[in-house]
Amino acid sequence: MFHKVSRISRILHENRFLVHSGYSDFTREALKNAERLENDIYVLLVGANLNDPKQQISEALKRFKKEINGSVIVSSLFRSEAWGFDSELYFLNQVWICRSEKSPLTMLNFIKGIEHEMGRVKTQSERYESRLIDIDILFKGNSVIDFPELQIPHPLIYKRKFTTVPLSELIPNFNHPVLNQKMFQLNDVLTDQVDRLED
């Protein structure tokens, strides 16, 4: 006997692969167990160290959610020293995970639009510098993408503990599609000081 089921939301765990079917639930628990992610799942990193970074990140998230249909799962906020340059100002960072049918370049243009709307002015310098707001794409499911303006996975994930710490909070078992290491494994070998911001 067959039952016709419409618009059923469910998540299947097959070989620890987060598989979406229809209008599936999108939960922290499912993400924590997943070793792989479907290609409509974006993982992003947001950071700031100017003009009340906590407020800047909150405002960026509000603007991001307006465009994204469905929930956005966010990590704790983490504080760390500037990476790649000297600054007396601490950075705050947070990881966002969402589902979206946007293409990688469309998503890139969308998040760079948020940065621009919030007042970030990008310079021609290739040096690292303080930022009002910065949003990067870390992963798009298990995709490996190499465009002149965009590389996915982000090529510096494995070097930055301010990235691997929030990733390990949300998707500790996710296998990096190029390095074939889980997020908690990448995090364990880094020694930078990263502190969770208390709520």
Image: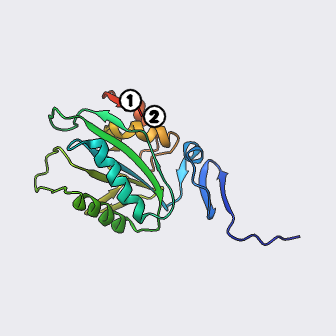
Q: Is residue 137 visible?
A: no
Residue in front for this viewpoint, 47 or 162: 47
Q: Is residue 193 above or below residue 160?
A: above
- Does residue 21 appear left or right of residue 99 in this picture? right
Q: CA distance from mark 2 to mark 1?
A: 7 Å
| Label 2 Cα neighbours within 10 Å, binned few <14 / some 14-19 / many ≥20 | some
Callout 1 crowding tier (Cα within 10 Å): few <14, some 14–19, many ≥20: few
Residue type at numbered disc 1: Val
Task: Please give the count of numbered marks on the rendered protein.
Answer: 2
- Which quarter of the figure is the N terminus placed in? bottom right
Q: Position of residue 20 (x, y in %)?
A: 60, 60
- Image spot of residue 97 (x, y percent): 45, 52
Tell me the amino acid under the disc marked 2.
Answer: Gln
Left or right of 117: which side holds 107?
Answer: right
Q: Which mark is residue 53?
A: none
Extreme residue in the right direction: 1
Residue 172 left/right relative to 149: right
Circle 1 residue:
189
Looking at the rendered structure, the secondary structure element under dot 1 is loop
Residue 11: give x, y in percent of width and height.
Answer: 65, 55
Q: Residue at x 14, y 51 (%)?
A: 126
> Could you tell me which quadrant the C terminus lies in?
top left
Q: Which mark is residue 185?
A: 2
Q: Residue at x 57, y 49 (%)?
A: 27
Which residue is located at x 41 percent, y 34 percent? 187
Res 140 → quadrant: bottom left
Whether tag 2 and tag 1 are in contact, CB under 8 A, the answer is yes
Q: Position of residue 173 (x, y in %)?
A: 53, 41
Q: How is the image coloured?
A: rainbow
Q: Seen in the image, is 36 located left or right of residue 84?
A: right
At numbered mark 2, what does the secondary structure look like: helix, strand or loop?
Answer: helix
